[in-house]
Amino acid sequence: MRWLSFERNGKASFGLVCDEGVVDVGALAPDVADLKAAIAAGRLADLGAAAVARPVDLPLAGLTFLPVIPSPGKILCAGLNYRAHQAETGRGGEPYPTIFVRFAGAQVAHNQAMWRPRESTNLDFEGEIALVIGKAGRRIAREDWLDHVAGFVPYNDGSVRDWQRHTSQFTPGKNFARTGGFGPWMMTPDEVGDPAALELTTRLNGQVVQNALSSQMVFSFGDLIAYCSTFVELEPGDVIVTGTPGGVGAARTPPLWMKAGDRIEVEVRPIGTLVNDVIDG
């Protein structure tokens, strides 16, 4: 199943994506506050079963998307998690994942504008695969990771590189407003198929700039969930962003920065494609 968050008549809701459009599950189940609450309550399966029997409420065209999880409790991001990206940056190689954080306010939804901040011209793309946590857990065993995942989502960890490099800490460059694209929807594990076979492709103005398989990650989905859940309890609706492959703009000669008027797309097959147009913000 594919689940998304959106705005309808000025009110936030969530729904199920069907071939013909979207079923407004938030209207169908007003006792459930949002997609995160539905995940936490373990109700996705029954809500989805009810929704597929109903006609769609809205077409996808013209829909006002919200970040798939608008207010996750935690957004944990893995850096330097593909060897090609390690090679192009000259960093990485430690025996443990590099983990940093994003804040919910730094995110932007599918089809919404990504902002290049006035403080920098060095806005870079990072196509990634995000995991949405479905079941709480602490010290999760690596082999049990999939039991704790509600779904997979395309993500663009848009990075303001000069601010990222002010010190050894990544946080400033990863948290400018509306730089983290998250969407269009979450696909549940039963439809994803083999998680190691997900194909990630980033396109800037229609040109492929990144391409990799999830099997090429240095630290697998299971590694990341096991590691992160060791130092913090993972909760339903939390997000783990799993790293970007090689090809980022900062590593090119000359650097390839995003600018106003650009369109950046992050496709994860078979899930879908996240699209954001860049503006000066």
Image (tube, rainbow, N blue to C red):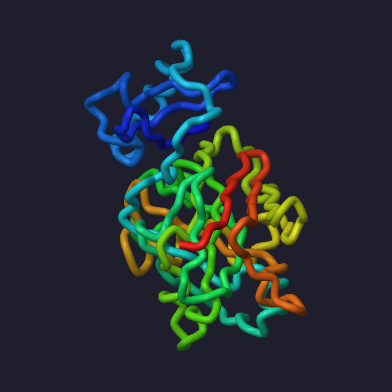
In the picture as drawn, the residue positioned furthest to the bottom comes out as: 167
Q: Nearer the viewer, residue 160 or 95?
A: 160
Q: Is residue 133 above or below residue 170?
A: above
Q: Residue at x 39, y 44 (%)?
A: 134
Where is residue 262? Give x, y as percent. Answer: 64, 56
Label count reads: 0
Relative to 218, is 280 on the left or the right? left
Where is residue 198? Give x, y as percent. Answer: 67, 48
Q: Is residue 217 above or below residue 89?
A: above
Q: Nearer the viewer, residue 76 or 17?
A: 17
Q: Nearer the viewer, residue 222 or 54?
A: 54
Q: Residue at x 58, y 74 (%)?
A: 122
Check the picture and name the quadrant holding the C terminus.
Answer: bottom left
In the picture as drawn, the residue positioned furthest to the left comes out as: 31
Q: Nearer the viewer, residue 58 or 44?
A: 58
Where is residue 61? Give x, y as percent. Answer: 55, 28
Q: Quadrant of residue 36?
A: top left
Q: Residue at x 62, y 81 (%)?
A: 93
Where is residue 265? Give x, y as percent. Answer: 64, 50
